[in-house]
Image: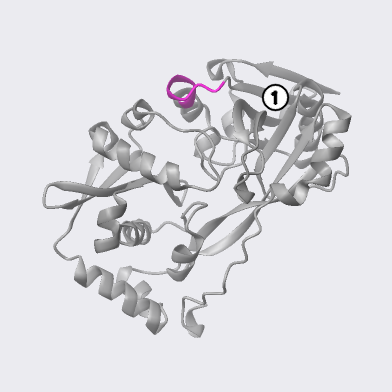
Amino acid sequence: MLEFRCITNPINLPPEWNKLADNYFQQIKFLLHLEKFNPCHQRYYVCFADTKLVSAAIVYSLRLDIFTFMKIKSPLKMHIVGIPCSVSSSGIFGYPEGVNSLKEHIYKVEKGLVLFLNLENKSENDSVASGQTLPTILFVNHFKNWNSYVSALRYPYRRRLNLINRENKYLQIEKKSCVEFSNEMYKQYLNVYDRSHGKLEKLNFEFFKNLPPEFKLTVCFKNDEIIGWNIALEHQNIYYFVLGGIDYEQNRKYNTYLLLLTSIIKDGIEKYAKTIELGQTAEIPKMRLGGTPKSLYMEAHHSNSLINKLIKMGSRMLEYKRILENTNAFKEENT
């Protein structure tokens, strides 16, 4: 027999929650951080089968453009099953049958539009609209060190990488704690946010400043001027590129974004991470450095049957349609 519960504060989540979670972003410690520094009316659903926790979900509410990938203004309040900080993790997890049961429960109890983000499989449920969302770019690390990685790249990509590093040898890359996050860095985050196509929640300054100590800040300086930065996380043999900011005027001169992106790959290789997750934006530059896209899916359902039919009819307008080039970043013997 299945039992469903809705919990309004992550401090009250059952201890089995973390054991069921797939990754750091679904765990209670990070959910407490989000609750404090990015409140979006979060609520947490759990499904028990004979007292055993079999699935769990994080739901939050925002007003967003439903046809965001078509750049059409279409503001609508929606209930999102996901992590409220723009990472590629799914907001629902657990045993497959439990996940399906919990999905149906959420559709029943959440009134209005419900949107599941970053699902690993396309829905086979005919009553929902579904399609692709932004892929996440994964770098599978089998390299002993940075030099072996560079040597494995095909010539055009290796030449470009060496050129960027050579031209920018006078820039400084420094590792810092997130407590040193500054107002200038936050402005650069807003620069990136304002240019992004798939806008979700806008994070506030305190979110970055108070990140748990396992999050590491990398800053690029030109003399004493901050021209870009990123935040990364190492957890369970995965090295995550989490968030970043750029001064776009300086980026045109120094390729700051690519310089910081290569620093993520270098750090991940040096930490012997099995996988470096590069996130869901700027797919082509990341693939040219050796990343491969992993398809992710979304599904949507409205509690009003008429509106739900209209959403299903327009489901192709909901999804991400960009066709990615086959970059073949590595020499054949290394693929």
Start-end of magenta stretch: 34-40
Judged from the image, the secondary structure of the residue bearing numbered disc 1 is strand
Q: From the viewer's side, name the closer residue of 97 and 261.
A: 261
Choose top left, top right, bottom left or bottom right for residue 148.
Answer: bottom left
Q: Residue furthest front?
A: 73
From the image, tell me which residue sits under label 1: 46
- The percent position of residue 331, horizontal first and vertical second, equals 46, 83
Position of residue 256 in the picture relative to residue 95 (left or right): left
- The percent position of residue 300, horizontal first and vertical second, equals 75, 38
Choose top left, top right, bottom left or bottom right for residue 304.
Answer: top right
- The percent position of residue 70, horizontal first and vertical second, equals 63, 50
Give the vertical position of 301 relative to 206 (above or below).
below
Choose top left, top right, bottom left or bottom right for residue 162.
Answer: bottom left
Q: Amino acid at mark 1?
A: Val
> Residue at the spot x=82%, y=43% of the render?
312
Q: From the viewer's side, name the closer residue of 180 and 284.
A: 284
